[in-house]
Image: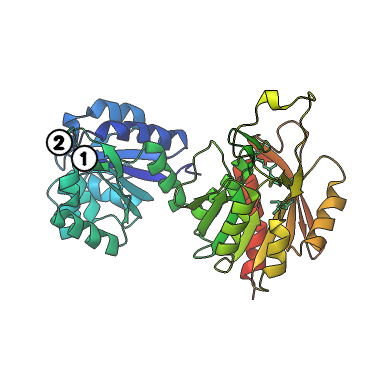
Amino acid sequence: MLKGKRIILGVCGGIAAYKSVELLRLLKKAGANVKVATTKSALEFVGEMTFSVLSENDVMTDLFGDNLAKSANSNNSKDFSVRHIEWAKEADAVVIAPATANIIGKLANGIADDALSTMMMAVTAPIILCPSMNTQMYENRAVQRNLDILEQDGILILEPGTGELACKTSGAGRLPEPEIIFDRVLKLFCQKDLKDKKILISAGPTRESIDPVRYISNHSSGKMGYAIAEAAEKRGALVTLVSGPVSISPPFGVNLINVESAKEMADAMIKELDDSDIIIKVAAVADYRPLMAQENKIKKCQRETGSLSIDLVENPDILQMIGKMKREDQFLAGFAAETQNLDNYALEKIEKKNLDMIVGNIVGIKGSGFQADTNKVKFFFKDGSTYDIPLMDKLQVAHKLLDHIIPRVTKG
Ligand code: PMT
């Protein structure tokens, strides 16, 4: 997604400057053309050579000297360009990580007294600022005031994380991990065709307790549902993700509601339903639960017959319940994992559960369905149209799904 994008990475003097090297690597790996501009103090933490080698570009550390460069595409020896203006003009995005109290103060107050701050005055591209400093400094009223100003100016401020800091204290001020900053850069370049749409997604398995140590569940990893949440958030949606127990991290920027059982999932979904424009039920919900979850662990010696029977009762069909409750202006999509007769079962479910669409998910073939990173799906809409999607990465499937849903929720 970043192929050919021109990104300026601004680095200021803080211990977290070492993380900017990893961020640079991620940006380059994604195909971006990255140029690094540092403050003088940044070079006390990471050498110019590191940024230069990894970015495969000159590094801007100073306004003078080499930085008054001759314009590359000019034959006129008198036609000099000023590098910090050239860089600012060319940039598709600027990320400052770490951003110190000093650069934050300068940018908020229009002070341009070194290469980075002077270049920033000329930048018109989107800017992401990643503050990182000691907690007292970060919470200082002047710093907070300056951050407010920058936010009002349209700069995206990435809140620092909380944890142990280099100054041996603990609190807010840690630079977010490079992967998170990278993810926010990716979002800048995503089309925002779901801007302000509220999307409710369920993902993962449910767990139905047998006793305090055992449960009934299934193999859902949450990958498919989380990929849809990630894609929707990047496209500007306000995403609520109701998730059964999974071991993957939630996408950045989504409202995560953790649940265990089908009953808890039903309660959470129904609570959020009214406030949702699009509902996508990806979760693999256990159809049955033990009639009674035992209070104490079932001991082997209790089973005198050598066998154990557990009475199961049916769980609520959440999708069907939502189908009955949904308003005309809400779009409801379900998933159906099938090993055979995909078309018949999928169409049956659209009808029975009052859905706008169903995603038929072929399981039982390599690289598709539960746990896999890729998926093979077919979209069925209630108007009868169908789309067979080739095997692809789950995030790509997620974008394809949204591509098909969006015209249906935004028309008229
Ligand atoms: O999580 P991954 O490892 O990435 O795997 C993804 C997936 C295979 C779980 C996913 O793509 C998928 O196919 N999910 C649906 C699983 C399924 O078999 O659903 P179902 O046929 O039992 O139910 C159909 C629909 O009804 C689903 O939308 C389900 O969420 C919903 N349902 C089912 C039962 C129930 N009690 N309540 C429900 O809401």
Q: In the figure, 305 relative to 188: above or below?
A: above
Q: Between residues 242 and 317, which one lies in front from this camera angle?
A: 317
Q: Between residues 405 and 49, which one lies in front from this camera angle?
A: 405
Q: Which sits earlier in the primary sequence, circle 2 or circle 1?
A: 1
The residue wearing badge 2 is 41
Write the residue at 28% across / 38% down: 163
User: Residue lying farthest bottom?
Assistant: 412
- Marks 2 and 1 in Cβ contact (< 8 Å): yes
Place of residue 127 in the rendered image (x, y in percent of width and height, measured from the top left): 32, 53
Place of residue 242 in the rendered image (x, y in percent of width and height, measured from the top left): 56, 52
> Image check: 294 left or right of 89?
right
Quarter of the figure with the C terminus? bottom right
Write the residue at 35% across / 32% down: 55
Mark 2 crowdedness (10 Å alpha carbons): few <14, some 14-19, many ≥20: few
For mark 2, give the secondary structure. helix
> Image check: 342 left or right of 408?
right
Q: In the figure, 382 relative to 251: above or below?
A: below
For mark 1, give the secondary structure. loop
Q: Between residues 269 and 407, which one lies in front from this camera angle?
A: 269
Residue type for callout 1:
Cys
Residue type for callout 2:
Ser
> Image check: 352 left or right of 401?
right
> Image check: 74 left or right of 330?
left
Q: In the figure, 357 relative to 75: above or below?
A: below
Give the quadrant of residue 150. bottom left
Tell me, yes or no, if residue 410 can be seen here.
Answer: yes
Q: Which mark is residue 12?
A: 1
Cβ of mark 1 under 8 A from ligand 1: no
Mark 1 crowdedness (10 Å alpha carbons): few <14, some 14-19, many ≥20: many
Write the residue at 82% across / 39% down: 339
